[in-house]
Amino acid sequence: MDFIRQVLDRVGDKWSMRIVAALASGPMRYTDLQRQIPGISQRMLTHTLRQLTEDGLLSRTAYAEVPPRVEYALTPLGGGLYEIVKHMIGWVADHHDEIRANRS
Amino acid sequence: MDFIRQVLDRVGDKWSMRIVAALASGPMRYTDLQRQIPGISQRMLTHTLRQLTEDGLLSRTAYAEVPPRVEYALTPLGGGLYEIVKHMIGWVADHHDEIRANRS
DNA sequence: CAGAATCCAAAAGGATACTG
DNA sequence: CAGTATCCTTTTGGATTCTG
């Protein structure tokens, strides 16, 4: 039951889901992600991308061009995770009002 | 898209899911939870229980007995969340090896 | 362009002692 | 039994500066 936390640590942090959601619509480069995800710092974008890539949820492709181009994309594994996450997003969307009502 | 974080903040922290999972098998009292969830501190158990209760995911029932008895249980809302979480747990269980293999 | 490095602030969480 | 209260450590994340 502890492996769950290891993945929740990846999914539950501040930015991972945003990045995964952003890439769900197709591959994107570093700067594009930065613009797509308002408020993310370079440090966190870089850091989170690396974690997700290390876990095999994202792929990173660097093209030897000038200026350099690096594209990130969901791997099949990452796509699978996104499906799960979408379920959760759906549930949250359905029950968000209820939760907010309780909170107040 | 920001309401997702609000729920992930609740689901993705260190203990919430453990508590929800423990209560999925039925109502439980404070001390039982403490024993069911190894490693949790009193501070965190209390704190997390309160958050979950405030969000309406758990109910808290205090019986006026001596010694005092307090039971926590999943609300229908909390039960619904647990269904989602179970999906995720299932997916993680299925792909954990793959993720771990990538990590190394 | 796509980062790496450093430093710092805030938040989360643990340990311990105490209480109605 | 079911918590509070306080203090402290660890973790997370942001700001800034610099580079291949």
Image (cartoon, coloured by chain):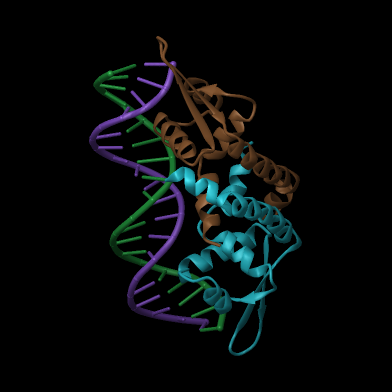
Chain colours: A cyan, B brown, C green, D purple
Residue B38 against residue A46 in the figure, above or below = above
Q: Nearer the viewer, residue B20 or B38?
A: B20
Q: Residue furthest bottom?
A: A66
Residue drawn at 64 percent across, 63 percent down? A53
Residue drawn at 56 percent across, 74 percent down? A36
Residue B41 as seen in the image, left or right of residue A59: left
- Which picture quadrant has residue A56? bottom right
Q: Position of residue A4 (x, y in %)?
A: 63, 42
Residue C3 against residue B103 in the figure, above or below = below
Residue drawn at 59 percent across, 65 percent down? A19
Rendered-image quadrant of the N terminus of chain A: top right
Q: Position of residue A14 (x, y in %)?
A: 50, 58
Q: Position of residue A51 (x, y in %)?
A: 58, 59
Q: Is residue B12 visible?
A: no
Residue drawn at 60 percent across, 55 percent down? A93
Residue A5 as seen in the image, left or right of residue D13: right
Q: Is residue B14 visible?
A: yes
